[in-house]
Amino acid sequence: MKLLYAPWRGIYTKDVSKNKSTKKSAEECVFCQQIKDDNDKENMILARNEGFYVAINKFPYNPGHLLIIPCQHTANLNDLSSETQHKIMDEISKCIEILKKEMNAEGINVGLNLGKVSGGSIPNHLHFHVLPRWEGDTNFLPVSTDTKPLSADLFSIYDKLKTAFEIL
């Protein structure tokens, strides 16, 4: 088995876990605060729906990395109603369509990290990742220079995707 060492993520999750316990309340949760805030552009929120919202990840693996975040403060998937779970799955499909069309994504990763040990950097509020991928989008820079290159400005991506979400 070959291993890929990715220290840049460890630093982020270590810093987050120092400041966030898995027992944080909704009042202390970054996602719950975004739900209450009315500055969608600053929070990179692309769409608000009944029961969840869609935002650009501010700490992306790739440009266009989206998060689908339930409004309900929970770490457990089964705490969400069946209706909300189904609506989120429909939204994941919509996100995939938008990323392929607007970002020319050649592939997509969809994921859900449940719990700190699974890689969840905010384990107290579950959230889904929809991640655009391109041939050759990984390289040596994060390992050798502690630098993750992003090929586009997040606010430019926000403006482009916001329009797409409003149309669909």
Image: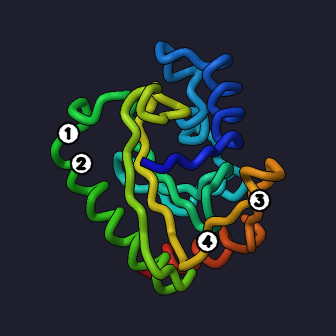
What's the distance in space between the residues labelled 1 and 4, CA to CA?
Answer: 36 Å
Left or right of residue 142, residue 85 in this image: left
What's the distance in space between the residues labelled 3 and 1, CA to CA?
Answer: 42 Å
Q: Is residue 23 above or below residue 102?
A: above
Q: What amino acid type should be assigned to the residue bearing mark 3? A: Leu
State the residue position of label 4.
137
Instruction: Check whether the beta carbons of the residues at disc 1 and disc 2 lie within 8 A of each other.
Output: yes
What's the distance in space between the residues labelled 1 and 2, CA to CA?
Answer: 6 Å
Camera-near label (4 vs 3) is: 3
SS at circle 2: helix
Q: Is residue 28 above or below residue 67?
A: above
Q: What amino acid type should be assigned to the residue bearing mark 1? A: Ser
Which comes before the other along the chain, label 1 or label 4? 1
SS at circle 1: loop
Quadrant holding the C terminus: bottom left
Q: Position of residue 129 (x, y in %)?
A: 45, 53
Residue at 56 percent of width and 61 percent of height: 65
Report the front residue among 87 and 98.
Answer: 98
Q: What amino acid type should be assigned to the residue bearing mark 4? A: Asp
Which comes before the other along the chain, label 2 or label 3? 2
Q: Which mark is residue 81?
A: 1
* Colour scheme: rainbow
State the residue position of label 2.
85
